Image (cartoon, rainbow, N blue to C red):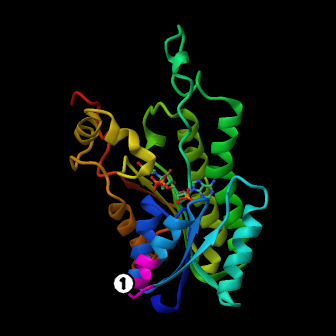
Amino acid sequence: MPELNDRTALVTGASRGIGKAIAQRLAAEGVRVAVHYGTQEKSAQETVETIERAGGRAFAVRADLLRDDAVDELFTALERELEGRPLHILVNNAAVAPAPGDPALAAQDGYVPGLSDTTPEEFDRVYRINVRAPFFVTQRALSLMADGGRIVNVSSAVTRIAWPLLPYAMTKGALEMMAPRLANELGSRGITVNTVAPGITDTDMNRWVRETPGAEAGISALTALGRLGRPNDIAGIVAFLVSDDARWITGQLLDASGGMALAPAMM
Ligand SMILES: NC(=O)c1ccc[n+]([C@@H]2O[C@H](COP(=O)([O-])OP(=O)(O)OC[C@H]3O[C@@H](n4cnc5c(N)ncnc54)[C@H](OP(=O)(O)O)[C@@H]3O)[C@@H](O)[C@H]2O)c1
């Protein structure tokens, strides 16, 4: 693996939230970062400018992962910037949580959150972005990736608890299957593949936490370290996994939740 200064990373969904923190952290370590985004060009440019102001190197690449041509669009832009050089790090971070269903449904008998209020269209949308996209982004990235490269998939602690956003939790369960198998396949090239699973983290995805009285206190009480996650908490763990010190970790799932839901709530 070359020195950090010679590495390039692709971080999907790096315009905001956890992906932005990962991009900034990797750039601070000297990695040149492709800041991927879907629609929020201004936010992506802000990520790039923040990195550059701090002395790092970054560029933005757009691709709406819902679209059929997303992988082509993303890699055409990335390859233009790479100019024949390899990619060293891929962080599959972009994802969406399902939009809330029809509130009228919640008042009906037999209502089950996450099951009753999910439409087939919404189910497909979440799977396309959270599962299909990282699968095919990884497939395409491998042809560019140097031996000794690193792949990190961002899952969620919700795969290990009974969380009401059922389709979202299911997408993350599917994503988690990638690391063990790919680690085995790619070990001969020295490429490691791991999954990081954040708990509830303070980003746009969780506006409801800020907007719901008592939600932050409730989540903090469920968490051994007693607070919501911050994007930098997750970025530090990803930075470790892509570092040379983590060369002997592959195929693993790393919890990044501060110890969320370690025991039933009353204990
Ligand atoms: N926040 C949490 O509590 C939490 C907990 C566990 C796991 N996670 C996981 O952590 C990762 C980051 O979450 P976050 O909270 O940082 O999310 P976020 O703040 O909502 O940011 C989502 C990112 O994904 C991109 N994205 C969304 N839809 C896209 C699409 N169709 N095409 C391309 N890009 C798209 C967004 O790009 P635009 O800016 O262009 O829209 C944005 O950069 C996700 O995998 C999430 O599941 C989050």
Identity of the residue furthest to the front in this view:
42
Q: Which residue is mark 1?
A: 54
- Does residue 107 show up? yes
Span colored in magenta:
49-56
Provide the secondary structure element on which disc 1 rests. Answer: loop
* Crowding near the residue tagged with mark 1, few <14, some 14–19, many ≥20 C-alpha atoms within 10 Å: few
- Residue 62 vertical placement versus 127 (above, below): below
- Residue 31 vertical placement versus 12 (above, below): below
| Residue 51 located within the stretch drawn in magenta | yes
What x and y, as percent, mark residue 128?
A: 69, 48
**Residue 205 as seen in the image, left or right of residue 232:** right
Identity of the residue furthest to the top in this view:
109
Magenta segment's dominant SS is helix
The yes-or-no answer for disc 1 within 8 Å of ligand 1 is no
Q: Quadrant of the C terminus?
A: top left
- Camera-side residue: 6 or 230? 230
What x and y, as percent, mark residue 221?
A: 22, 38
Three-letter amino acid code at disc 1?
A: Ala
Residue found at x 56% / y 39%: 98
What x and y, as percent, mark residue 220?
A: 24, 42
| Residue 50 located within the stretch drawn in magenta | yes
**Where, by quadrant of the figure, is residue 134 drawn?**
bottom right
What x and y, as percent, mark residue 143?
A: 73, 77
- Camera-side residue: 108 or 84? 108
